[in-house]
Amino acid sequence: MKAYLSGAMEFAHDEGASWRNDLALWLKNTIDHEAIDPVIESANLIKDNNAQNYREWKVSDPKKYASFIQLCVKNDIEIVREKADYLICLWDHNVIKGAGTHAEVTFAYDLKKPVFLINKLPFNDLSGWIMACSSKIFSNFDELKKFLIKEYGYNDRS
């Protein structure tokens, strides 16, 4: 099984790499699931397209910036469609200014792939749209992990 780790990147500290790294290790070691990390996918696209300064292009060359971001969007859509079995989404204040996480959750919902949402916002501030697209909503990662062990089993590697 493969989990796509959805969540803010553009406006998140370290592009959200820390929580994704931690969860990817937990998924592999505990339930033997692979994680698809869009931070890593994005880094590969940056390298392959010599786009190390792409964030500067947003102001200096908006067309070039949008063209590169289109590659990222297409890549994310293809991964969600073709490679991911389910999404794990961190929904926090950093997703509000972005759009990718909203789209990934909606796209996964349309594809009938489970969306497991960790909501870090006050529940009244959680979008009804996102609620409707989520298969299950958790308030923290520990709740999610307990659910995943129950849902997919525990992998004892001792």
Image (cartoon, grey):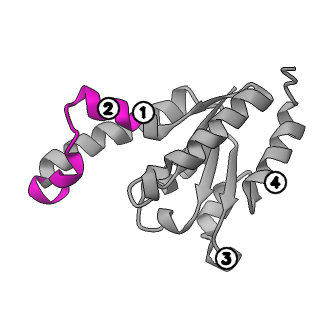
Identity of the residue furthest to the bottom in this view: 124
The CA span between labels 4 and 2 is 33 Å
Do the numbered discs 4 and 2 sit on residues whose CB atoms are within 8 Å?
no
Identity of the residue furthest to the left in this view: 60
- Amino acid carrying label 3: it is Pro
Q: Is residue 92 magenta?
A: no
- Amino acid carrying label 1: it is Glu
Determine the main secondary structure of the stretch shown in magenta.
helix
The CA span between labels 2 and 1 is 6 Å
Other residues around mark 4 within 10 Å, as few (<14) / some (14–19) / many (≥20)? few
Q: Which residue is mark 4?
A: 143
Do the numbered discs 2 and 1 sit on residues whose CB atoms are within 8 Å?
yes
Q: Is residue 51 magenta?
A: yes
Q: Which residue is mark 2?
A: 45
- Amino acid carrying label 4: it is Glu
The CA span between labels 3 and 4 is 17 Å
- At 60% across and 70% down in the image, what residue appears? 127
Rendered image quadrant of residue 49: top left
What's drawn in magenta, residue-wise? 41-61
Q: Which residue is mark 3?
A: 122
Q: Which residue is mark 1?
A: 41
- Amino acid carrying label 2: it is Leu
In the rendering, at what x and y percent does residue 41 appear?
42, 33
In the rendering, at what x and y percent does residue 6 appear?
55, 47
Give the SS element for disc 4: helix
Say if 95 sits above or below 41 in the image: below
Say if 116 sits above or below 83 in the image: below
- At 50% across and 53% down in the image, what residue appears? 101
Give the SS element for disc 2: helix
